[in-house]
Image (tube, rainbow, N blue to C red):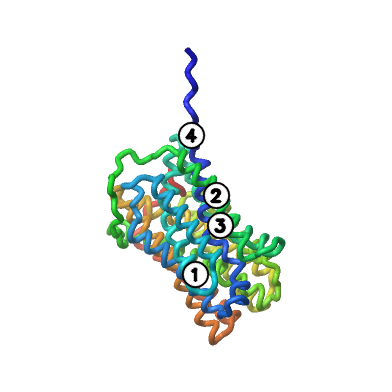
Amino acid sequence: MITAAPRRRPGYLAAAAVFAVGMMGTTLPTPLYGLYREEIGFSTFVVTIVFAVYAVGVLAVLLLAGDYSDRAGRRPVLLAALALSAGSAVCFLCENGLPLLFAGRLLSGFAAGLFSGTATAAVIELAPPERRARAAFAATAANMGGLGCGPLLAGLLAQYAPHPLALPFLAHLALLVPATVVVLLLPETVERRERRARPRPQGVRVPPGARAAFALCAPAAFAGFALLGLFTAVAPTFVAQTLEVTNHAVAGAIVFSVFLASTLGQLAAGRLEADRALPRGRLLLVSGLVLVATSLGVESLPLLVAGGAVAGFGQGMAFRAAVATVSAAAPAEQRGATISALFVIAYCGISLPVVGVGALTLWLGLRGAGLVFAVCVALTAAAGRRGGDRPASGPSGPN
């Protein structure tokens, strides 16, 4: 009797693809804000508020349900995140004013908060032991790559296809269908699951032994994500209004280049010890911000692109090193909570400074507000404890 071979289930690369599709939806609106402004009529400040709502959703999930997939299982949480992504797309498709824009961004933030920890863990856990380091980078690349592909896809469709405010979200809904099928076929990696697991608040906790490392790394995480927030929320408006480049595909490509540079920076950090990658990444981040500030002053698109690429590369290098440093310094039983605290700082960086830029535009204009932002974030990136207790160094990425 011939028995059928067992069906091979999708592995960590398939899970990484799902991760990328999910994160793509969170940045789809980036090159479309100009079109929404024309349709609804609102200021740059309101654009930053709409963007900040997304970060509020991410932070809420990280603080209230950061470990939920550890107890409920990876697949149910991934399916919930995909459902929230679909709900966000529907909100944008049905948009008839600011309320649905806010709702869409909030649902998108909830989805990103669930994806960030759950998908990362799933990708790593699905890899065989000898490929765990490769899987960790696959998760990182899926995260940043998905964030970068969202503006690129939306910009291309908005510029060269009909129905610019509908087609990007219809395309994302179409991608969510095979992503859902993949999740249903993925093996569950959490063996002991609670049947009626409920979210429980995590708060922000840093054990005493990790505080020196945390103080060193937190400013770089905050500044790096502030840079990503600026390019995601404000850069397309600056390109259109100040540089008078109204091509949506160009705006999307600029944002994509920053996230691509971040992914390459994280790849480069994997070849260095964390205590070497962190200062180099911070230096590149500051250098890139100087170029961004110069581009705002002289109104130069090439300098803006170059500054975003250099700063993005530095952000990726510094953030991967920061995660490795904090992870190595924290006790094993508190490592997850400590890394979550670093992500909370990072997502505060992606929201608070961007809202500040929006408020400053009311008095200084977009260019003046951008200059203030670049200087302040560069100073933050250069900050951190020096000397004293030397934080434990570790490998630049999880194994």
Q: Which residue is mark 4?
A: 9
Residue type beneath disc 2: Leu
Residue at 43%, 49% in the rendered image: 78
Find numbered disc 3 in the image and state the secondary structure of the residue it sits on: helix
Q: Which residue is mark 3?
A: 262
Real-space Cα separation, disc 4 to disc 1, in angstroms: 38 Å
Residue type beneath disc 4: Arg
Q: Earlier in the sequence, mark 3 or mark 1?
A: 1
Real-space Cα separation, disc 3 to disc 1, in angstroms: 31 Å
Real-space Cα separation, disc 2 to disc 4, in angstroms: 28 Å
In the depicted structure, whether residue 132 falls above or below residue 159: above
Of badges 4 and 1, nearer the viewer stands 1
Q: Earlier in the sequence, mark 2 or mark 4?
A: 4
Q: Are marks 4 and 1 in contact (CB under 8 Å)?
A: no
Tell which of 345 and 307 is nearer to you. Answer: 345
Of badges 3 and 1, nearer the viewer stands 1
Q: Earlier in the sequence, mark 3 or mark 2?
A: 3
Q: Earlier in the sequence, mark 3 or mark 4?
A: 4
Residue 33: x, y in percent? Answer: 59, 71
Of badges 1 and 2, nearer the viewer stands 1
